[in-house]
Image (cartoon, rainbow, N blue to C red):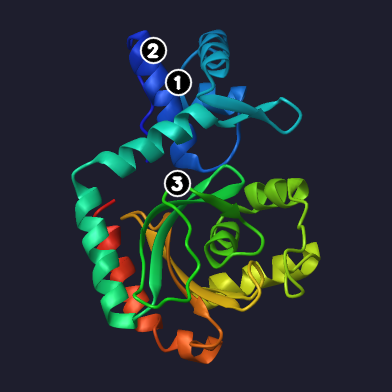
Amino acid sequence: MIKKTRAAGSAAERTLDLLALLAHSGRAQSLASLANALNLPKATVHRLTSQLLEAGFIARANDDKEFLVGAALRRLALDTLNHDTAQGLRHVVLADLVKEVGETCNFTTLDGASVRYLDRVESTWPWRLTLEVGAKVPLHCTASGKLFLAYMTDDMQQKILSTLSLQPLTDFTITDRLKLEKECESIVNQGYSIDRQEFVAGLIALAVPVKNTEGRVLGGLAVHAPTSRLSVEGALKHLPALKNAAERMSKLL
């Protein structure tokens, strides 16, 4: 939980508390809710948000009446996650998973309305999809993307879905919003997400959430392979291995 800051705190402390509150809540916050949670005057919070908006650390949402995490703060979080000591340990977890399942595996995170690859270990097979670390892929048609959509708060999910074009990338891409919402419900209930050739024809993927100690989904761990080598049923046989790796990965966040 984010503790209320003291009104006598420094400007830097207040700014950091505000950013921490937005990052922790996982949803847009109004000026009044921020002021109440931080125990600060609205005028003070208005000044802080104005400065953070200008710097790109926060952004406006819901007709400019609420605030959420901005692009600059997401970049800072991603850079921190990619360059700390634990990054090497996370790579080991990913490499061990690839050895166990025999297919390419990746570690991803939510970056705005896209999925960003944080790490990746390739299989030795000649037929494989190659995406560089740092690359972005869509939310609505990838295993990790649908996973992040599914575990969003209801208001954030609806906001994201209202802005996504749901562009069909293959004949199997889900382009109907109601069907995608039902898919998200199933993902939460079963604890994993499947890409059934929705992103690339002939390629399937299976993803599981990587949660922090508070149960928040901070990343996705996925395996993918061409249908010529791996069926959906075959991918699900790797589910225990993915969940075990996700548990190991969660301790390194």
Which residue is the site of mark 3? Answer: 134
Which residue is the site of mark 1? Answer: 39
Q: Nearer the viewer, residue 228 or 28?
A: 228
Which residue is the site of mark 2? Answer: 7
| CB-based contact (under 8 Å), mark 2 and mark 1 | yes
The residue that appears at 36% across and 73% down in the rendered structure is 123
On the image, the x and y values in percent for residue 28 come to 60, 36
Mark 3 residue crowding within 10 angstroms, few (<14) / some (14–19) / many (20+): some
| CB-based contact (under 8 Å), mark 2 and mark 3 | no
Q: Which amino acid does the dot numbered 2 rest on?
A: Ala
C-alpha gap between disc 2 and disc 1: 7 Å
Q: Which mark is residue 119?
A: none
On the image, the x and y values in percent for residue 100 come to 28, 81
- N-terminal of the pair, mark 1 or mark 3, is 1
Q: Is residue 1 left or right of residue 251?
A: right
Q: Is residue 192 visible?
A: no
Q: Is residue 183 visible?
A: yes
Q: Which amino acid does the dot numbered 3 rest on?
A: Gly
On the image, the x and y values in percent for residue 246 come to 33, 67
Q: Quadrant of residue 21?
A: top left
Quadrant where the N terminus is found in the figure: top left
Q: Which amino acid does the dot numbered 1 rest on?
A: Asn
Q: Is residue 8 left or right of residue 231?
A: left
User: Of tags 2 and 3, which is closer to the observer?
Assistant: 3
C-alpha gap between disc 1 and disc 3: 38 Å
C-alpha gap between disc 2 and disc 3: 40 Å
Q: Is residue 22 left or right of residue 103?
A: right
